[in-house]
Image (spheres, rainbow, N blue to C red):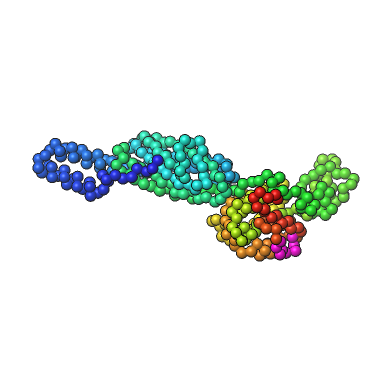
Amino acid sequence: MEPIFTSIYTILLFRAGLITLFLYLLQQSLFLPAFFLFFLILIIETAALWSKLGFKKMKVETKVNLSRLFPDDKINFSLICQNEKRLPVYLSWQLPLDQEFRLLDRDETFSGGIRGKVYLGPYQSKEYNYCLTAQKRGYYQIPALKLYSRDIWGLFNREKTIEHNQHIIVYPRLLPLEEVSMKAADFSGLQQDKRPFLFDPIMFAGLRDYTPDMPTRLIHWKASAYQDRLLAKIIEPSASLQVLIAIDAQSFIYPDSDEVLFEKALSVAATLAVWADSHKIPFGLAANLSQKGQPGPISLPVNRNLDQGRLVLEALARAELAPLGKLEDILQDKALSMLWGVTLIIIKKDPNPIALASRFGQVILYPLLEAGDDL
């Protein structure tokens, strides 16, 4: 619904002319035309006051149930209007959204935005819910909501803008692991072993029954005395698999820009990050990409924080195909503060290797082929 624009009756010069004509008719003793003109002026001025008071004691609130999601996930956008006065209100609204969003469960045409209207009686409130879905990953700022208040005759139309600080982050689309075509064997046996040769006394994971084939230094004497049986410590190895996912942006720019393969590269990186997070494998992300709303290239250290998965997916959602420096320089800087033995996975368009620091235990080159080719 398009907003109702102000008619000719709202022009101050026209309203002043009506008052002048009314006074002239009174002066000429033309009381009947003057009465009808007075009635018209009364309607116009009442309508002007009605639209002006429309936003008084009026509360409008918007809510979004999800701010971080994957493509095709459903978003519930709620608009709550509450009239806290005796005067009835006629409201309409318009919220433009990016073309990547689609309105669901509605017969009306989406047309790139949310539109609606409502009549609110005295002390009445109503809630409207819109179901949206995002079709492409990205970082989207929710724009300002345009509100329009009008009188019952539609002569006057007042506008109000409600700014939003909310944003919606759509993560890259995840791919099936079979399509990513990465196997555990690709990591050259660096997976955690059940009987590690080297122990790290800091990584204490739990207790289990002691058996004669275990070293006596693993016995937990206090727990054994309390349970009246020998219990051994469960120790995680210090040489667990660690993964650093890297994306070379320049390979998707030169010689030709390839947006399709770039989006696939982000999906591959997101899929590997989710896989590592689900297997409790420390992982990080490095890319010479600019980020929408964030300064500098992407550089997240390798760790196992609970929030690591969200940080990596959010960085990939903000990524823009605009190279910032060289990937080699970013990896050299990260290698200075990195433990030895990290497995590096480089995602790029071509299979050409790049010069890297020797601190990486293994380097896996993941070239992306053109559409229709097999990985």
Where is residue 21? Give x, y as percent.
16, 45
Residue 36 in the figure: left or right of residue 127: left
Name the residue rendered at 33%, 45% in the picture. 5
Please tell me whether residue 95 is drawn above or below residue 328 in the rendered image.
Answer: above
Q: Is residue 225 in view from this perspective?
A: no
Where is the N terminus found, in terms of image quarters? top left
Q: Nearer the viewer, residue 195 or 116?
A: 116
Q: Nearer the viewer, residue 302 or 234?
A: 302
- In the rendered image, the residue lying farthest to the right is 212
Q: Is residue 137 in view from this perspective?
A: yes
Identify the magenta region. 353-360
Residue 359 included in the magenta stretch of the image: yes
Please tell me whether residue 302 is drawn above or below residue 131 in the rendered image.
Answer: below
Where is residue 151? Give x, y as percent.
31, 40
Residue 60 in the figure: left or right of residue 199: left
Where is residue 157? Give x, y as percent.
33, 44
Q: Tell me the quarter of the picture where residue 303 sits.
A: bottom right
Name the residue rendered at 33%, 37% in the picture. 87
Name the residue rendered at 67%, 58% in the picture. 350
Residue 13 in the figure: left or right of residue 244: left
Please tell me whether residue 240 is drawn above or below residue 127 in the rendered image.
Answer: below
Q: Nearer the viewer, residue 232 or 340?
A: 340
Q: Tell me the quarter of the picture where residue 200 sits.
A: bottom right
- In the rendered image, the residue lying farthest to the front is 372
Magenta part, dominant SS: loop
Where is residue 223? Give x, y as percent.
81, 44
Name the residue rendered at 80%, 47% in the picture. 234
Residue 374 included in the magenta stretch of the image: no
